[in-house]
């Protein structure tokens, strides 16, 4: 393990915010992680994965531990399905593409989501009608105090919309080291009815899509709406899509008949946050290098030299306007640090 001091994290967060870490250590195996935690039991650590779901608002005066555990393997398989274990440091999108190359189905709707495998369960990533929990079997995570690896089942993870036990009562207590997925080898269950997937398939004259076709459609849609973090700093969706009661939605629908929605349950309605932000006049907004993307109002962007503090101010202004205009509390999906 090599300790780098006063290390810039600009290349390790998708917003491209130029903040610095007092110390930076990259961990490539579980033994080194355990050794580091043992030596640093009295120190504050900052665990860093792909850096895709965070907004850094200042320098990190802690030891930043970059989880760079790599590798994937087949744990078991039958004629119908396979269980794959992927290490926490694997790039998520590259892992999804690998599963598709093997003709393993289940993750195709989650193509092109930024980040690493190890951080995916923390917020139960999801897109286009599919969530991580739908194919999740279990994950291994190291207790930062006892240094023991524990297996967390689907039930123990307590997944909900963009949420898990790792964001709540166990926050900061465990470091995920690997994740297992149950994927199909045949009779793939295709989800084509969310968002613009079906129209994208029709545009390409695909009438009997396979999992690769679904992935290609999702990638095309995401690229048309979302900027590439390598070109414009961003963290994808900055806010969660709010879930409101049926009664509140009816009141909003009377004022805004065109408001889109997705039924979650008999009394819960999901409203697209991007639509709310667009209606509030923020789509394409820019102040200095901090802005809202011109094609997708759900995405806050760093056009170059914006600070995390400037983007945080912008996000709070958006939240206030949405509260005032729609009486909806917009919650950030990214972690504010």
Image (cartoon, rainbow, N blue to C red):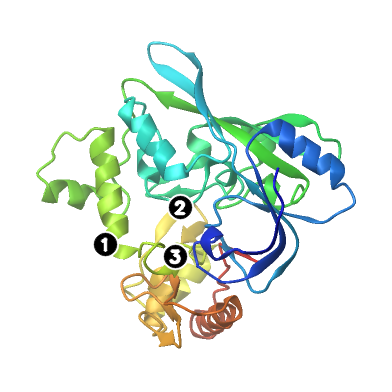
Residue at (85%, 40%) from the top-left corner?
A: 38
Please give the label number shown on residue 321.
none
Q: How many C-alpha atoms fall within 10 Å of the one at disc 2: few (<14), some, or many (≥20)?
A: many
In the figure, 106 relative to 261: above or below? above
Q: Which of marks 3 and 2 is nearer the N terminus?
A: 2
Q: How many C-alpha atoms fall within 10 Å of the one at disc 3: few (<14), some, or many (≥20)?
A: many
Q: Would you identify the image quadrant in which residue 107 lies?
A: top left
The span from disc 2 to disc 1 (Cα, nearest Å) is: 15 Å
Residue at (42%, 18%) from the top-left corner?
A: 81
Please give the label number shown on residue 114.
2
* Disc 2 secondary structure class: loop
Q: How many C-alpha atoms fall within 10 Å of the one at disc 1: few (<14), some, or many (≥20)?
A: few
* Disc 1 secondary structure class: helix
The residue pinned by badge 3 equals 271
The residue pinned by badge 1 equals 224
Question: Of circles 2 and 1, which is in front?
Answer: 2
Q: Where is residue 116 in the image (x, y as percent from the top left)?
A: 52, 45
The answer to whether 85 appears left or right of 7 in the picture is: left
Residue at (23%, 39%) from the top-left corner?
A: 213
Give the position of the C terminus as an image quadrant: bottom right
The answer to whether 62 appears left or right of 250 in the picture is: right
């Amino acid at each position: 393990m090599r300790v780098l001091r006063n290390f810039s994290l600009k290349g390790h967060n998708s917003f491209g915010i130029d903040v610095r870490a007092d110390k930076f250590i990259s961990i490539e195996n579980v033994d080194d992680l355990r050794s580091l935690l043992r030596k640093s039991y009295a120190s504050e650590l900052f665990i860093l994965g792909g850096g895709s779901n965070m907004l850094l608002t200042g320098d990190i005066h802690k030891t930043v531990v970059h989880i760079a555990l790599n590798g994937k393997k087949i744990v078991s398989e039958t004629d119908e399905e396979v269980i794959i274990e992927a290490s926490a440091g694997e790039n998520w999108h590259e892992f999804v593409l690998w599963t598709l190359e093997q003709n393993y189905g289940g993750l195709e709707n989650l193509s092109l989501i930024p980040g690493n495998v190890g951080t995916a369960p923390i917020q139960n990533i999801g897109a286009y009608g599919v969530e991580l929990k739908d194919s999740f079997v279990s994950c291994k995570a190291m207790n930062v105090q006892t240094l023991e690896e524990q297996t967390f089942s689907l039930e123990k993870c307590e997944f909900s919309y963009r949420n898990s036990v790792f964001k709540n009562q166990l926050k900061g207590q465990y470091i995920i080291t690997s994740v297992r997925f149950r994927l199909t080898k045949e009779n793939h269950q295709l989800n084509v009815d969310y968002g613009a997937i079906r129209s994208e398939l029709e545009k390409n004259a695909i009438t009997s899509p396979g999992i690769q076709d679904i992935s290609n459609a999702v990638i095309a849609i995401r690229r048309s709406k979302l900027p590439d973090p390598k070109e414009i700093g961003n963290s994808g969706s900055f806010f969660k899509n709010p879930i409101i009661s049926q009664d509140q939605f009816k009141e909003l629908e009377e004022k805004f008949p065109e408001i889109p929605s997705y039924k979650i349950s008999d009394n819960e309605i999901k409203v697209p946050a991007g639509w709310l932000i667009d209606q509030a006049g923020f789509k394409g907004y820019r102040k200095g290098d901090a802005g809202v993307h011109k094609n997708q109002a759900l995405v806050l962007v760093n056009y170059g030299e914006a600070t995390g503090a400037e983007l945080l101010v912008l996000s709070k202004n958006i939240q206030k306007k949405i509260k005032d205009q729609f009486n909806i509390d917009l919650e950030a999906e990214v972690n504010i640090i």
